[in-house]
Amino acid sequence: MKTLFISCWFVLATILSFGQADLASIRKIRDFHFPKEILVWNIDNLGNIYAIQDEVIVKFDSTGNQTFSQSIKSLGRISEIEPINSMKIVLFSEEQQNICFLDNTLSLNGNCKNFEEFDVKNAKLIATSNRPNLIWVLDEYRSTILLIDVVKDQIIQRVENLKGILNESSEFIDLMEKDNFLYLTTSNGIVYQFDQMLSETGVQLANYSKFIDEKQNIIIFISNDQLTTLNLKSNETKIYNCPEKNVTEFKIQGDFLYFRSERIISKYSVK
């Protein structure tokens, strides 16, 4: 499972205007209430929220209505939910070492894929690609990144001994593709950027930052009930009071900002 920190960082191009605006101008849309602790969650491109509680996955639409619920007990403990689009999501189980696909009704779509088929010893992180049917996988045991076509069951790219190549001893905690770049974050706050050929193209030190945006170069992070924006080009920082308390994680999707506490996800407009 991806490590969750009290301070988690997410970046999108839309955050630039948010970072330069008065934080008090953002508007709360609604709260999504859950009866039990939210274990894993994510948001798709249409604003649908997916969350796992115990052994059940639920789906809320953007207006706050719960539309579907499905038991996933047979799939094992889920580590990540990664939406491909609003019609298909990927569930990753580090425990089972596989990925399963659900359709827009949360029904299983085809057979699950076991990473053993691709000679992966210990998959720790995955990330969806904007290229159809491709999934990034980090094999922790071999310190290897793979790009897998899950329809053709083919390995498209593979780079082994990643820690040796990067001269990195810290744990890898996050993997993400954005704007045709792949980003790999370490536990000591280093973010490595790779192009589509898996050649390293940049390094940033940003305290466990997850999402780097190359166009706007803005990072936003939360700590001690405060939001901080950091401009990677100018090193300018701005600090605001967080509109929600006891936040353990937040995400940005389009023009909306989502804060998560133990049982509540709060949605804000940041236009």
Image (cartoon, rainbow, N blue to C red):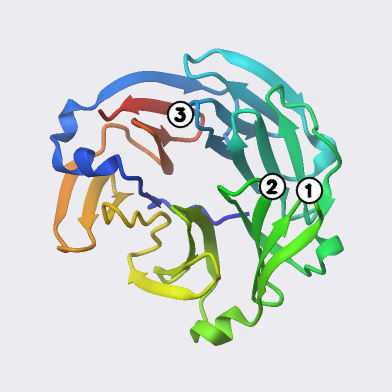
Seen from the viewer's position, the closer of residues 228 and 183 is 183
Residue holding disc 3: 265
Residue 197: x %, y % from top left: 55, 70
Asked if marks 1 and 2 touch (Cβ < 8 Å), the reply is: yes
Residue holding disc 2: 133
Real-space Cα separation, disc 3 to disc 1, in angstroms: 33 Å
Seen from the viewer's position, the closer of residues 89 and 149 is 149
Q: Quadrant of the C terminus?
A: top left
First in sequence, mark 3 or 2: give its number. Answer: 2
Question: In the displayed structure, does residue 8 sit left or right of residue 35?
Answer: left
Under tag 2, what secondary structure? loop
Residue 245: x %, y % from top left: 33, 35
Residue holding disc 1: 151
Real-space Cα separation, disc 1 to disc 2, in angstroms: 6 Å
Residue 78, relative to residue 269: is it above or below?
below
Residue 225 appears in view: yes
Residue 165: x %, y % from top left: 54, 85
Type of amino acid at the residue the image marks with label 3: Ile
The label on residue 87 is: none
